[in-house]
Amino acid sequence: MSSIIKTINPYNGEEIKEYKQFSKSKIETCLALSEKTFETWKHVEISDRTKLLKKLSKNLIKNKQVYSELMTEEMGKPISQSNTEIEKCVFLADFYAKNSDQFLADDLIKTDAKESFISYDPLGCILGVMPWNYPFWQVLRFAIPTITAGNTVLLKHASNVTGCALAIQDLFDASGFPKGCFQTLIADHDQIDALIADQRIKAISLTGSEKAGRHMAEIAGKNLKKAVLELGGNNACIVLADADLDKHIETMVAARMQNTGQSCIAAKRFIVVEAIYEEFLEKFTKKVNDLKIGDPKEPETRISVLARVDLADTLKKQVDSSIKKGAKVVIGNRKDQAYFEPTIIIDVKPGMSVFDDETFGPVAAIIKVKDNDEAYQMASNSKFGLGTMVFTENFLEARKQISQISDGAFFINELVKSDPRLPFGGTKASGYGRELSKEGIQEFVNKKTVYINH
C-alpha cells in the first residue's frame, strides 16, 4: 500500500494536498522512460534544445504568479521573494539558451595528430535530490543545464514542496520537451538510495544538509557514481573599520534575513572589527526591527514563518544552547509554531552552536574582533566553505585576501549570491562540484578525448 505525503501550509498549519508515494513499479516505469528518452534526446541538436528552453522561459513568465503563490503556500516564502525567484529562473533559462552551444562546442587542441579535440557528450539519466528552500530555483539551476547538455533528469524533491515538483514537470512538458526528459518522483529516501545503485542512473546532484551529503556521497561512491554536492554553509560577513555602513547596512541585513534566513549562502556569522562594532550593532538592529513581519501572501512582508515547525524547534535549541555558553540575545529568540522571531545574538564565540553550525533561519550571530587580521582568521574558522563576504572601502587590500579564503566564493561589498553567469559551489563540508555557468553544464558530460590521424 502506498504511503501518503501531505503538504502543509506552514503559516496557518492547514493541509494543502495529499499525494501518493510512487510504488516500486512506478519508479521503474519512470526510470525506463528516462533511459529510452535519452537515446533520442542525446542526438537532438543543441540549437533545437535551446529553442525549447526559450519556450520554457516564456512559460515561466506566463505562470509567474501561479508558481509564486504555490511556493508561498507550500513553504512560506514571502510572495515578493517568490516572484523574484521565478524571475531569476527566467534569467537562468535565457542564459543557457544563449550560451549552451558555445559551452558544449568541441574544444580543439593542437597535438601531433591531424585532428584532436575534446567532445562533450551527455552521460544519461541524472538523479537530482533537491531541497525546499528555493523550490523552483534549486531544481532548475540543476535541471536546465543538465538537460540542455543532452541528459535526462529524475527529480526527488523535498516532500513539503511536492506541488512545486509536479509543477516543474508540467513546465517542461508544456514547453515541448520530450516525455521523459524531466520527471518528478514522489518517493522516500530508501527508494532513492536503491535507485542510485541502478546502473541506468549515471550521476547524482544533491543540494541539502551536510548530513544528507555525506549519506549520498557514501552511496554514490559505493556505486562509482559521480556526485555534485551543494551542502550547508556558515558564511562569514566581515565588517572592517572602514566599511560604509550607511551604504551597505541594508545589504548586510538582506544577507542574513533573505528567505526568512533559510539560505545556505546567507551570512550566518557577522565578524565586526571593534572600532566600528557599536555603530554596526545599532544600525543593524534598527534595520532588522524595521522588517515587516507577517502573512507571506502580503506584498510588503519580508519575514514570515519557517517552512516547518521542526525547523523552528531546531533553531531555538541552537540559540538557547549558545546562550548557556555565554552568548546574549539583543532582540528576538521567540518561537511560535513555525514562526521564529528575527534574532540578533552577541558575545558569540567558537564552540557555540550559532558559530560552529549552520543556523537555518533569521538568527544573526555577531562576533567582535580587534583588527582585520583577526577578522579574516575568525571567518576561516569554520568546517564549511560556501562563501565569505567583506565590507570595506579598501578594495585593493581586500583583494589580497582572495587566495587566503578557501571558500567557493568571495564577495566584496555585496552579499554572496548565485548568478547563472558564475560557477556556484563550495569546499570542505559545503560539498564539491559546481553548478551554473560553463562549469555547471559541463559537470554531467563525458569530456571525451578524440585523436584522429588521417
Image (tube, rainbow, N blue to C red):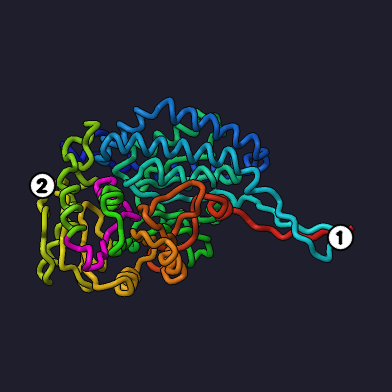
**Disc 1 to disc 2, C-alpha distance:** 71 Å
Residue 68 visible somewhere in the drawing: yes
| Residue 169 found in image quarter | top left
What residue is pinned by disc 1? 453
Assess whether mark 2 and mark 1 are in contact (beta carbons under 8 angstroms): no
Where 371 sits versus 115, above or below? below
Count of residue discs:
2
120, above or below 323, in the image = above
Residue farthest to the top?
Answer: 62
- The stretch drawn in magenta includes residue 263: yes
Check disc 1 and give the amino acid type.
Asn
- For marks 1 and 2 on the same chain, the one whose residue lies earlier in the sequence: 2
Give the image location of residue 114, x and y in percent. 86, 59
Left or right of residue 92, residue 367 in this image? left
Look at the image and tell me in which quarter the N terminus lies: top left
Q: Which residues are magenta?
A: 255-278
- Of helix, strand and loop, which one carries label 1? loop
- Asked whether residue 232 is in view, the answer is no
Residue 320, numbered label: none
Q: Which residue is labeled 2 in the image?
A: 336
Instruction: Give the residue at x 50% y 51%.
Output: 422
Asked which secondary structure carries label 2, the reply is strand
Query: Could you say which is closer to the camera, residue 367 or residue 277?
Result: 277
Q: Quadrant of the C terminus?
A: bottom right
Quarter of image, res 413: bottom left
Percent position of residue 322, x then y:
15, 67
Front-lying residue, 369 or 188: 369
Residue at position x 69%, y 58% from top?
Answer: 448
The residue carrying pointer 2 sits among few (fewer than 14), some (14 to 19) or many (20 or more) residues within 10 Å by Cα, namely few
